[in-house]
Image (cartoon, helix red, strand yellow):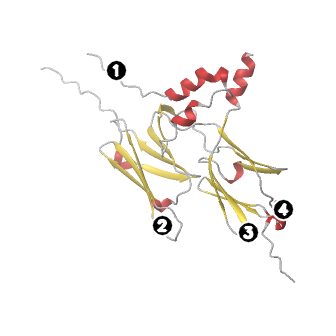
Amino acid sequence: MKLIRYTYPTMNPARDFGNLLGDFEGFFPRFEDFWREPAAVPADLYEDDANVYARFELPGYKKDEIKLELDDSVLTVGVERKAEKDGDEEVRLSRSVSLPDNVAADKTAAKYEDGVLTVTIPKAAEKTAKLIAIE
Amino acid sequence: MIDNRTQSVRNEKARPHFETSETKDAYEVRVYMPGVGKDGISISHEGDELAIGGTRKNLIPASWRAFSRESRDCDYELKLALNVRIDESKIAAKTENGVLRLTLPKASESKPRQISIE
């Protein structure tokens, strides 16, 4: 049996539909503008040869208001802001993404810059099948 | 025609989320532009239009391959038509963690005037 790795869709179906309507742009309102509203924390997943990267757009928070948790290859970002003075809005957000299986979770590093949180998770060394000689 | 299309894709700009509020002396605009640092922001005010541009700094390295994407790479552009008079010379801007905070002081003639009765 051949195992084929699942490739996550890289395109946003709403955006494709928007492109379809591209010729009529200006006549119809942009479809993706409606569609994108509910995703409070946009998340991206990338990889290169050494690492898996997760990026979250979280503008306007302080570093200590953001919490990261990695549990069994599910990466969760939580934001909690308490209202300090009257008129402040209390914020509680959370977003989870599933990581591929072959990651070394204990070596995760994260960086928050200009409202973008980038998490770097190194890939674990591939388990190579061990050849057993028959005597 | 094909040229036109590619051009429009490359020059595509996203309209950032923004919020406005008002105090006694000023209007405040907060523009949410994740990925834009201090150097990537341009602000211009001409006539009744306030134009804010944001260029992303931390673009994705070419060696990264995407599994799934929800964010966009395009830069930001926001044009606001002002229907209030502001003091252009005192516009203040500050950016922190991807949020631009603009303070637009009210022009003195647009503040309520107290008229005393003699």
Looking at the rendered structure, which numbered label has been put on residue B89? 4
Question: Do marks 2 and 1 share a chain?
Answer: yes
Asked if labels 3 and 2 touch by Cβ distance under 8 angstroms, the answer is no
Which badge, 3 or 4, comes first in the chain's sequence? 3
Question: Do marks 2 and 4 share a chain?
Answer: no
**Crowdedness near tag 3: few (<14), some (14–19) or many (≥20) residues, C-alpha within 10 Å:** some
Asked if labels 4 and 2 touch by Cβ distance under 8 angstroms, the answer is no
Q: Residue at x 29, y 44 (%)?
A: A72
Q: CA distance from mark 3 to mark 4?
A: 14 Å
Q: In the rendered structure, the residue with mark 1 lies on which chain?
A: A
Looking at the rendered structure, which numbered label has been put on residue A83? 2
The amino acid pointed to by label 4 is Ser
**In this rendering, position of residue B72 left or right of residue B9:** left
The amino acid pointed to by label 3 is Asp
Q: CA distance from mark 2 to mark 3?
A: 24 Å
For the residues carrying marks 1 and 3, which lies nearer the camera in this image? 3
Which of these two is toward me, B65 or B31?
B31
Q: Position of residue B10 (x, y in %)?
A: 69, 29
- Residue A125 position by quadrant: top left
Which of these two is toward me, A135 or A92?
A92
- A133 versus B44 height, above or below: above
Q: Which residue is mark 1?
A: A4
Question: Do marks 2 and 3 share a chain?
Answer: no
